[in-house]
Image (cartoon, rainbow, N blue to C red):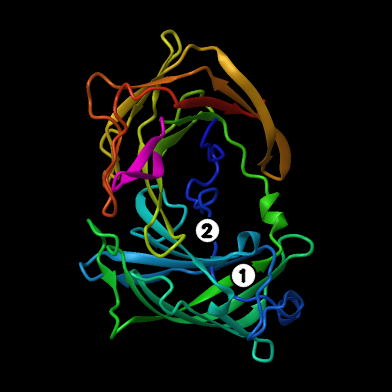
Amino acid sequence: MNRRISAGRAAIPAILGSILLLSCWAAVSPVTADAAGFHSNSTPNFGDYYSQTNNVKLTSSNGHHLILNLYVNNPFGDFHLYVLLSDYGCNTCTQGETHQWDFPLSPDAFSYSSETKAWSLDTYDRIQPFGHLHLDMKQISQGTPQCSGQTLTNNSVKGSLTFATGAEGGSSWGSVGTKNKPVSFTTTATATYNNDCLANRLFPCFTGYHWTSPGLPVASAGKIVGSEYFQGWAPRLSNGKLGPEQIMFLRQVQLPHPLGAMRWDWDTDVAPPPTLDAGIGAFQIWTGKPGRGFITGASSLLYTGSSLSKNQSFCKQGNKTVTQREIDFSNPSWKDNLGTEGLTAWMHIGNSPSIPSESGNGAGLSYDFTK
């Protein structure tokens, strides 16, 4: 299925997951760092590096209570800083709004001392007009590798941050800190070097339906700068019925400044079980009245009942590795339910998009099972 985030897997990506996909900041052992060439006044060349801070609680200038996570990685040798802000405080919650800014950074933003096992990062003016970040980190213990060849460390972190969520204009969560008074924080971080074991990790098995809406372009100043869509998972319970549905809205946009920067937006919400009428080929999505209404409205996927393709992969069922099978239904079309409002994601940053009825092809519907 196009744009698919593996069904039944933890929805936030931690992208973030497959979106994104997310990484963060911390250190590796001095042996690995030396071998990789990550010294003061030298060029980082980490290969597959991933690090992340634990949650930092913040309050923005207009009173929003937010959770900050910082990530650093270097896919294909290019370092990226990710600033992730959410209004709920965990990366696997079932309801909430999250935004992640991706800033490319050059190697000279980092420095490392193998003697003290201490690191620092300073963005200088490279994430303007959003703000500035400085981090000081120190390794406090060696972690347990998740696979052969991986290095994992635990680190203490001290940082100062100024960040304007509305730097692009429009609605926002306000700012965190100011130029003259940045927000100071302490937290911890983990880091890994050589993440092949993460790439090869098997996800928990899933039985149920997964769907995606048609994708829509995101325009700014007359140019296409990104795309957005909805998707959801409805598990089939042991009694044969469909359970409550996890729904997500996902958007990716290219930012005008700084060069190469991007932003990911996503809403997650829980909806009542969808209804499935195999006789007429209709899969109906009803959000009902979820707690905080991050996603509202209702829509349907109409399908022919014939399968377009059958695929299989492997998944984890307890301690066992089993075969996960997937059936994709042919060319489902997207329509509103009986004239109700289409699915709408309510967001504080960016617009609140709705996928309109009769929006054409590009939707997807599949059924996953392990038997």
- Badge 2: residue crowd in 10 Å (few <14, some 14–19, many ≥20): many
Q: Give the residue pinned by disc 1.
A: 191
Q: Is residue 249 visible?
A: no
Per the rendering, the mark at residue 78 is none
Task: Identify which residue, 223 or 287, lies in the foreground.
Answer: 223
**Residue 304, image x, y percentages:** 48, 11
Q: Amino acid at mark 2?
A: Leu
What is the secondary structure assignment of the residue under circle 1?
A: strand
What is the secondary structure assignment of the residue under circle 2?
A: loop
Q: Residue at x 46, y 77 (%)?
A: 123
Vertical side of 14 occupied by 108: above or below: below
Q: Is residue 156 visible?
A: yes
**Residue 52, image x, y percentages:** 54, 67
Seen in the image, is 339 located left or right of residue 223?
left
Vertical side of 68 occupied by 342: above or below: above
Please identify the residue farthest to the left as the structure is shown: 62
Q: Amino acid at mark 1?
A: Ala
Magenta residue span: 214-228
Q: Give the residue pinned by disc 2.
A: 22
Please identify the residue farthest to the bottom as the structure is shown: 115
Position of the C terminus, as image quadrant, is: top right
Please identify the residue farthest to the right as the structure is shown: 148
Which of the 4 quarters of the picture holds residue 191?
bottom right
Seen in the image, is 206 located left or right of residue 63?
right
Task: Identify which residue, 320 or 180, lies in the foreground.
Answer: 180
Please identify the dominant SS of the magenta region: strand
The CA distance from mark 1 to mark 2 is: 12 Å
**Residue 75, image x, y percentages:** 62, 60
Q: Residue at x 54, y 37 (%)?
A: 7
